[in-house]
Image (tube, helix red, strand yellow):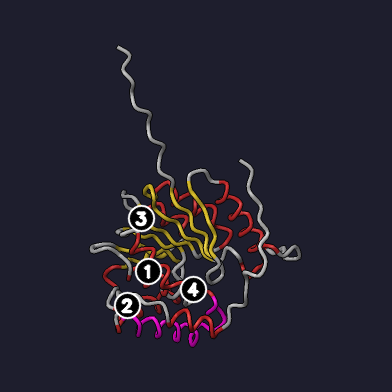
Amino acid sequence: MARLEVVMAGKGFEFTDELRSYVMDHSALASETDALAAAKAWMIERTHEALADVSGMQIAPEQGPLLTMLAQTLDARLIVEVGTFTGLSALCLAEGLADGGRVLCHDRSEEWTAVAREGWRLAGLNDRIELRLGPAATTLGDLPDEPIDLAFIDADKGGYIGYHDMIVPRLRAGGLLVVDNVLWSGRVVDPSADDGNTRAIRAYNDYAAADERVDVTIVNVGDGLLLARKRKPPARPALVRTW
């Protein structure tokens, strides 16, 4: 079926710091305790203080409540994260877990994840989060033998397609894969942008959109989130007796 192309004007606007504050002020989750709010604020501040040069790798603040709500909506019991950095996204995912659920985090940096461990401890959710250090292409091979409800990828851009293909088969039907940075500050549509990361993200977006195992949409939150929902297998036709 051919795609319907629609040109819409006047729907975009600059997402200012004032709008970001407004969004956060109006994001109300009953799950966010005072300890959780304090831990998130500490993680953001600590990341900027200790890792100023790479602090932009932390998720946008407005992405956090969305991740929590997605986990709650899916009643998630097993969440997998690829690329943990200083742990804010993992904390938001853990906040939305169903009782007895857990988040399995994959990252290579002991330095960055040291901040994560302390933030999780301050929030009182460290018992829900398990960190696995090492190349995700290796550690993802040791996932437990149970379906994944929700996965979040925010790691090396050249690895996105490989991580996608390792996770999608393990998602339960109706489970969700969320991938960050897919708009790459708008460079995905900038013809002059030809660096390796931009090319990798374009290739991933094309790959995910063509993957018949999932339904895909991109939402303009933070640096762009791609949501891929695992399709349910087609229903088998009913047997018709002919005698």
Q: Which amino acid, mark 4? A: Ile
Tell me the magenta residue range.
36-56
**Of marks 2 and 1, which one's residue comes earlier in the chain?**
2
Distance (Cα) linking label 3 and label 2? 21 Å
Residue at (42% x, 63% y) in the render: 81
Q: Is residue 88 left or right of residue 154?
A: left
Q: Examine the structure image and report whether residue 137 is included in the region drawn in magenta.
A: no
- Our reading of the magenta stretch's main secondary structure is helix
**Of marks 1 and 4, which one's residue comes earlier in the chain?**
4
Q: What residue did someone put label 2 on?
A: 32
Q: What residue did someone put label 1 on?
A: 68
Q: Is residue 78 left or right of residue 141?
A: left
Which numbered disc covers residue 149?
3
Q: Which amino acid, mark 3? A: Asp
Q: Which amino acid, mark 2? A: Glu
Please, what secondary structure does the residue beneath circle 2 have? loop
Farthest top residue?
243
Are dots 4 and 2 in contact, CB under 8 Å? no
Q: Which amino acid, mark 1? A: Thr
Q: Camera-side residue: 138 or 13?
A: 13
Query: Which quadrant is home to the N terminus?
Result: top right
Identify whether 198 is placed above or below 36. Answer: above
Distance (Cα) linking label 1 and label 4? 13 Å
Distance (Cα) linking label 4 and label 2? 17 Å
Residue at (48% x, 85% y) in the render: 50
| Viewer-nearest of discs 4 and 2 | 2
